[in-house]
Image (tube, rainbow, N blue to C red):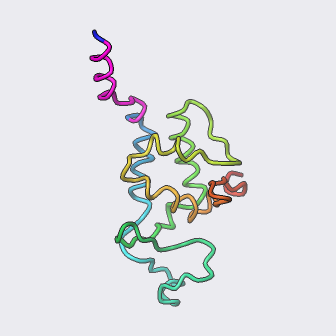
Amino acid sequence: MSSEAKMTGDLFEVDKRLALKPIVDFNSYLRAAFADGPCTCGRCVASQGDETGYEYQHSFNFAGRVAHRRFASTAGSDVLLALKKAWLSFTKIELAVSGELDLATVKDFVEPELHKLLVPLFVASGLTREVDGQLQIQAQVAA
């Protein structure tokens, strides 16, 4: 096979790790993490959607589509568990549960159309917080 044929073939290679169950499950989890429309929890209804003073955001605008986080399935510990399984499956190493989260690696195993959900979910669930533009895993969630 010529080197040109090898290079062309590489363009169509799909990383087989992306078909592993924990990776597929994590992408499905991301798809289900948000529901259509603004949050309708008692607090949001009482404040008429004004989230001023909320520690974590409830409603989000994804390119004109308003959505809210499904609280029952997206607690920080739930997000961490799903992420840890996918991370281990993809990288073959345990996810460090403190310090900076390597978002680039997470994006490597997340479907591109779901990338926009990552940071809002990680921050709103309490799994991470943004420090100087970097996502830091919260120690209390990891414990």
Quarter of the image holding residue 66?
Answer: bottom left
| Residue 137 as seen in the image, left or right of residue 47 | right
Q: Position of residue 29 (x, y in %)?
A: 43, 53
Which one is in front, 141 or 56?
56
Q: Is residue 59 above or below residue 22?
A: below
Quarter of the image that includes the N terminus: top left
Q: Residue at x 50, y 34 (%)?
A: 90
Q: How many marks?
A: 0
Q: Is residue 112 above or below residue 69?
A: above
Which one is in front, 76 or 104?
104
Residue at the extreme top? 1
Quarter of the image holding residue 7?
Answer: top left
| Residue 49 as seen in the image, left or right of residue 15 | right
Q: Residue at x 45, y 71 (%)?
A: 60
Kindly report the secondary structure that dominates the magenta region of the rendered protein.
Answer: helix
Q: Position of residue 119 (x, y in %)?
A: 52, 58
Q: Residue at x 47, y 89 (%)?
A: 48
Q: Is residue 117 above or below residue 98?
A: below
Q: Position of residue 113 (x, y in %)?
A: 36, 52
Q: Is residue 10 above or below residue 31?
A: above
Residue at the extreme front? 4
Q: Position of residue 30 (x, y in %)?
A: 43, 54
Q: Residue at x 54, y 72 (%)?
A: 57
| Residue 91 as seen in the image, left or right of residue 97 | left
Is residue 56 located in the magenta-colored stretch of the structure?
Answer: no
**Magenta residues?**
3-18
Is residue 12 located in the magenta-colored stretch of the structure?
Answer: yes
